[in-house]
Amino acid sequence: MGRRRAGTFGFLLLLAAGAIVFASLPAWARAGRLPGPYDYEKDAVLVKFRAWPQDQMHPGQNQALDMQAGGAEAASARQALRVLHGVAQKQALPFSCEHWRLAEGGSVPETLKLLKQSPLVEYAEPNYQRAALAPRADGPNDPYYQSGAQWWLEHIQADRLFAENRVPQGQEVVIAVLDSGIAANHEDLAARLVPGKDFINPNGTAEDEDGHGTHVAGIAGAVAGNSAGIAGVACGAPVKLMPVKIMQDRVGYDSDIAQGIRWAADHGARVLNLSFGSEAMGRYLEEAVDYAYNRGCVLVGAAGNDAVNEYGQPYNPKIYPAAYGKVIAVAACTRAGVRAAYSEFHDYVDLAAPGGDDGTTAEMIISAYAWSPASYVYQFGTSMAAPIVSGTAALLIIQDPTRSPEAVKEQMVITADKIGTLAQDADGWDRYLGWGRVNAYQALTHTLTFTPAPAGRQAYNYPNPFQPTRGESTCILIPAADNGQAATLRIFDSLGYLLWTKDVPAAQVYPGQVISWDGRDKNGDWVANGVYPFVLEVGDKVYRNKIAVLN
C-alpha cells in the first residue's frame, strides 16, 4: 500500500570491534517524532455499526436519512450513511468494522463528527498510525558475531537454562511477530519459520524489507547451538516464528494491524509480539487485542521510547497497544540494570527487560537483520525488550501448555528481579520498571533459594472499561476464598500516586462481595480517561489489575 510517515529518524554512526553499525539518536535529538492522535490516514475512517435487528435503522431515522441520501440510492440504513458521507470505497474488516475511503475532498474530522451523531454507529475513529519502537539501521553492517556481545542473555539467565539442559521440550509454540516481516533465508531464523501473512502487499510473502521485524524475531527465537550468529531467548526449545507483516517503512495502520492480530490468533500463535505503538488509544485495535487474549494468546507490547522529547523535556505519553490492560507492557533497562533514559514509565508497565542504550555497541542489543542471510545489527529500544519477554512467555507455555495468559504473566511477575529503586509498595512494583526485570531461569525453575513475593495475583473488575460520567461504576471482585477477612482497595494514577482508598471490615467480606468505584478521586472529582492500576489487599494476600476509564 506504500503508506509513509511524515518525518524520519536521525542516526548516530558508531564504530566498535571492526563492525559499522547505526543506532538511533536519543529522542530529543531526533528529527522525527512518535505518531500521535492526529497521525492517521487523511482520507479514511474506521466505522463500527450497532447491531440493530435485521440491519434496520433506529426507529424514526430511516426516512430522514433516506431523503438526504437520495432515496433509491439507499438500499439499507448503512448504505444510506455511506452515500451520505461520500464513501468512495469500503473494506470489510474483522470485528464487524468497516474501513471507509472518503471521496476526494472528504474531511476525516467532519465525517467523524457527523457519524458519532448517528444512532446506527457504535463508534467511528481515525485509522490511527503506529510506528516501530526502535531505531532504523540504514547502512552496511559487518555480521561478525562478537563473543560475549549478548550480555542480555546472561542478565535474564536464559544462557543458564541452556547450559544446565533445563530448556523445556514438548509441543511447539508459535510466536507471531507482528512487524515488518522476517527475512526468510536468514541463517539463524529460517529453520524456525512457519507460514505467515502479508497485510501490506496483497500478494506478498511477509518478507522483511526493513530489518526491524527480523531483529525482533532473532531476539525471541534465533536458533541456539548452531555455531552461527546469536542465540535467541528460546534457546533450544521447540519455538516457531510466524511473520505477520503489518508495517512498511516502520509505519502501520490499525486497519492492517487488527487484521494481523486476529489472523495470528486464528492460525495457532500462542504469543504475539507487538513492538510498535503510538499515543492514540483506538477502540478498534483494542477489540483485536481482546479477541486474541480471549483465545488464549499472550500479548507482549513495547512500552515506548519517548520518556523525553527531542528538546530533552519530559514527554512520556501513554503508548498503545502496550497500555491496553490485556497486553504485557515491557519497559527497557540497560546493561547497568537501571531504566533506560528513553524508556517510558506509566501505570501500565508490567515488566522490564534489557533494551540497551546508546553510546557504544557494548550497551546495545545485537540480533539478526534482513540485509543478508548472515547479517547482524546492534540496536536499542523497548522494541528490543519486548521480544525478550515474548521468548520467556513461549518457554513457560512449552513447559505447561495449559497455562493461561494470566498464569504466564503471573509467573514472570513473581519471579522477576527487583531491580527498581522507587517501589510503590512492599510488593515491589516500581513505576519505572514494573515488577522488575524478567528472569527466564527463575520463571522456569523456581530455585529453592528464591521465594516469590505475594504479588502478581490478578483481581477482576467489571465493566472494564467503564464510563463514570454516564453513571457507571466498576465492581472489583473480592475472591470467594478470602471471605471473612478485612479488605482494602487502593487505586493509583499513572505516576503511582494514591487516588482513592476503600476499607471493608472483615464482617462485610463474604463470597461474591465486590467493592464498587464510581470513577471519582478522593476529592470527589471525576478522573480523566486512562488506565488506573489498583491494589486489592485481602488479609495477607495482594491482588492487582488495571481499570480503564473511557467516557
Image (tube, rainbow, N blue to C red):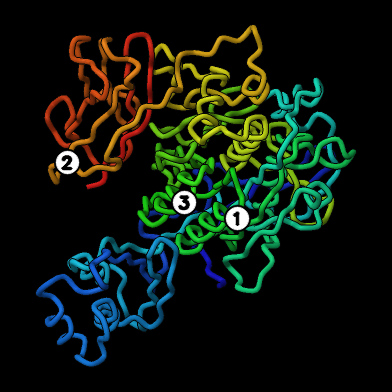
Residue 267 numbered tag: 1
Mark 1 residue crowding within 10 angstroms, few (<14) / some (14–19) / many (20+): few
Q: Residue at x 47, y 26 (%)?
A: 434
Mark 3 residue crowding within 10 angstroms, few (<14) / some (14–19) / many (20+): many
The nearer-to-camera label among 2 and 3 is 2
Q: Which residue is drawn at 26% across and 16% down?
A: 488
Tag 2, which secondary structure? Answer: loop
The residue labelled by disc 3 is 34
Looking at the image, which is closer to me, 29 or 104? 104
| Mark 2–mark 1 distance (CA, rounded to whole Å) | 37 Å
Q: Which residue is drawn at 27% across and 20% down?
A: 511
Q: Which residue is drawn at 44% across and 63% down?
A: 94
The picture places residue 86, in percent across and down from the top left corner, at 30, 82
Residue found at the far bottom of this picture: 72
190 up-or-down from 394: above or below: below
Labelled pair 2, 3 in contact (Cβ < 8 Å): no
Residue 354 numbered tag: none
The picture places residue 68, in percent across and down from the top left corner, at 17, 85
The residue labelled by disc 2 is 472
399 up-or-down from 254: above or below: above
| Mark 1–mark 3 distance (CA, rounded to whole Å) | 31 Å
Q: Quadrant of the N terminus?
A: bottom right
324 up-or-down from 255: above or below: above
User: For this view, does 498 lie left or right of residue 410?
Assistant: left
Looking at the image, which is closer to me, 123 or 8? 123
The amino acid marked with disc number 3 is Leu
Sequence-wise, which precedes: disc 2 or disc 3? 3
The picture places residue 89, in percent across and down from the top left corner, at 41, 81
For the question of whether residue 484 can be seen, the reply is yes
